[in-house]
Image (cartoon, rainbow, N blue to C red):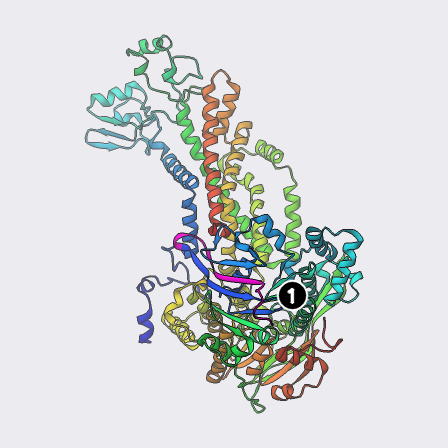
Amino acid sequence: MDEVTTVRPPERLADKPQGAIPGAPPRGRRRFSLSPINQRRWQNFKANRRGYISLWLFSVLFVASLFAEFIANDRPFLIRLEGKLFFPAVVGYAETTFGGEFETAADYRDPYLRKLIAEKGGSIHWPPIRYSYDTHNLDLPTPAPSKPTWLLTEEECRPVVERKGLTGCADLEYNWFGTDDQGRDVLARLIYGFRISVLFGLILTLVSSVIGVAAGAVQGYFGGWVDLVFQRVIEIWTSIPSLYLLLIISSVLVPGFFVLLGILLLFSWVSLVGLVRAEFLRGRNFEYIQAARALGVSNATIMFRHLLPNAMVATMTMLPFVLSSSVMTLTALDFLGFGLPPGSPSLGELLAQGKANIQAPWLGLTGFFTLAIMLSLLIFIGEAARDAFDPRKTFR
Amino acid sequence: MDASAEPLLTVRDLSVAFGQGAREVVAVDRVSFEIRRGETVALVGESGSGKSVTALSIMKLLPYPSARHPSGRIHFKGRELLALPEDEIRRVRGDDITIIFQEPMTSLNPLHTIEKQIGEILLLHRGLVGAEARARIVDLLGQVGIPDPESRLQSYPHQLSGGQRQRVMIAMALANEPDLLIADEPTTALDVTVQAQILELLKQLQARLGMAMLFITHDLGIVRKIADRVCVMKEGRIVEHGEVARVFQAPAHPYTRALLAAEPKPDPAPLAPDQPMVIETRDLKVWFPIRRGVLRKTVGHIKAVDGVSIAVRKGETLGIVGESGSGKTTLGLAILRLISSEGPIVFMGNSLAGLRFKEMRPFRRDMQIVFQDPYGSLSPRMSVSDVIEEGLWVHHPDMSEDERQARVVRALNDVGLDPETRFRYPHEFSGGQRQRIAVARAIVLAPSFIVLDEPTSALDMLFQSQMVDLLRDLQKRRNLTYLFISHDLRVVAALASRLVVMRHGKVVEEGPAAELFADPKTGYTRALFAAAFDLETAPEGVVSQ
């Protein structure tokens, strides 16, 4: 036994399976190092410069948008007043907290409140953009939708400038991409809209691939009648014109984030079933599967431990494309007005506004470029992933 | 053989490299040999020794530009093949030099008829069409021994047997009466009886047409049978070449000597009539239903195993031999209850028939299997340690990590692998080592009965005899009982104490191995033995074509 302990590499001592279920395989042994085959795939992915850069850009944009409250908000993220710290971006305070008169929520954009705080010697720290997605700019120089501030002429600015006692356009609070038809800042809405689109897409992709992979796995592994019945059900299911059904359902149910997610999930889970089913059908006759059965390994373990890794290659390759199509579906519904509830920041709604206000091209252009860049990044990432997973690619 | 005559093909200092930069692999390293007209030269070596790559570079069929020739010249009938442009080399291929591949299943296009596939070559190189081409095709099919060739013209490859498909491949290769025929392991995928027929055919045709042949094989028996001269390849180099008789009698290179000594030594486990019965089947049947029509009514059965009764006593090895399709593997899987079957199976006094998968689990500790393909039987995504200990997780879930590792290490030691390597992945091991890992996976549970399903077939000669020694050693040390399934009679002869000969799902003949080998009773068994040991063909009608 001594000999055994000496040959064991040190990392195994630290990484014993904890609370392992009887009969379950040891898990997470190599959690921190990629297997050689995955290392090679990662190298291949990195070798595709376009995809690699796209992945970085997309990750940076997405992570940044997760902190949208600290980038674009009508509430400061920090107020220092009389030795105390306030975090309005995360905590709601009443106006009386800062010495106001009413018990209502504080409106930090109100000059009255700002004056109050300034008089008490407090300081206010704002995010770079002082609008949230639902902030109406009440000091618009032109009727909404209003141009980006840097396109305004001094002539157009004058009424607001005079009313507020400023010197020129440059002193106004900037709407970098203009405002929409209700006077809301387009850039702020864009940041929140990007976040909600990507989050929606990610959750939809994840949930539908979990369901799709599970369904495909069961079909492929057991085959026979299970497969036959399931396949027919899926055929019937996919022949339902999904967009029309979506329109009908979303006019009955009050559309919210999770209702929409549920409705879209009804149809999106089928996209991966065929792939995974084919992989399992192919894989279940491999000799190492037979060997595992001869060892008495249970069906569930065989599927998870031996067959799923094979199917994951095909699944991983498809995921970026599923993600971009999920984003597109949400945008399409929003564009048609059957998507997220009115007032939510959404790229589809921005496009719809752009279509309704041809005289305000900044709406349509912003929506178009955001979608085009986001989807292109996703497609580039998808292409690079597909090539990285292609075993024949390595011989070139 | 006129030694002064100009050789037909001269290969000088040929090298082949794949990949670039740091990942460059030299597959063939400065190989030189020559083939004279009408002569057969054999290239022998284990897999990965570069024999096929050498042959393919003669026809420039390698995946250029990822393959390169850092050095070398290939001189054929006054022309330098390596320097020929693509359109000229295309005229050489299929006309002056032709090739037959190993796998007749995949070298024919499944969507075209035989006539169309042979006709294509005649059209390309000779411009033959219509009745003229058809006459030539019928003639060729007759030459390669396809019975009633005219009726076969419209057949598709799947309608032919493996041997017939290989005959069609040969007909295609001979269509334009080439000067040189390259045969790349043409019989490896075939049954022994068919192998003997194909070798016979190639020999006859070569004598009749006077062509030269480059014969690639890993089987020294075939070399002795068919070749005039032999080149032994190892790791991309030709380590020895010379006349077959000379090389076989007085091998100069140690590697050649090792190859020649690699015949598995016969030393089977003794019969043990007093020992308890380990496994017994009576009239075991595995029938796959053939269903037709909308209602999927069963119209008949494919009788893969049709009423087979076997009995193995403790410590014995039961050899099961037969051609592919005879049902031997199916029988093995049925005994382990990996496919459903009819008829009683009794394992150490317990009836296994009708047990559900979960009810079978306690027995699986005692009965294990080793498969044929060492590449397919290990999951590429699991480390060796994970592979071996999987059974322990199932059958001893409460075993401590230390104990489990100890068992894995002991199993690896038993199969002669360094336990330190157990955290590597299967692709880092050679075929022979992988098969040892598969054996380790089977013995780690300390079973008493192991089904060995062609465990040596995918291995090179050297590894085959090592594997046989290993299995015999394990059997003695652990008092194991084997069910040894193989089509390779030399390996079976080395291990089996009793023998069952199967054909078309039925037992043709059975008995103690020594008696059966000495005095086979049925014509089929005699033909099988003759084909396997002496590469002799049987009279018509005894074996399938």
Frontmost residue, A241 versus B275: B275
Q: Tell me the quarter of the image containing the C terminus of chain B.
A: bottom right
Q: Position of residue A127 (x, y in %)?
A: 31, 28
Q: Tell me: residue B499, above or below residue A12.
A: below
Please tell me whether residue A121 is drawn above or below residue B165 in the rendered image. Answer: above
| Snapshot quadrant of residue B285 | bottom right
Residue B369, by quadrant, is bottom right
Q: Residue at x 50, y 18 (%)?
A: A357
Residue sitting farthest toward the bottom: B274
Question: Residue B405 location, x and y as percent?
Answer: 38, 71
Question: In the depicted view, which residue is nearer to us: B99 or B419?
Answer: B99
Tell me residue A188's x, y (percent).
Answer: 39, 27
Query: Could you tell me residue A378's position as x and y percent?
Result: 47, 38
Task: Report the residue at 57% width, 44% height from top.
Answer: A271
Closer to the camera in the image, B37 or B271: B37
Can you see residue B159? yes
Could you tell me if residue B283 is visible in this image? no
Q: Which residue is mark 1?
A: B211
As for residue A175 lying within the magenta part, the answer is no
Q: Is residue B21 magenta?
A: yes
- Region rendered in magenta: B1-22
What secondary structure is found at the residue carrying circle 1? loop
Amino acid at the residue labelled 1: Met
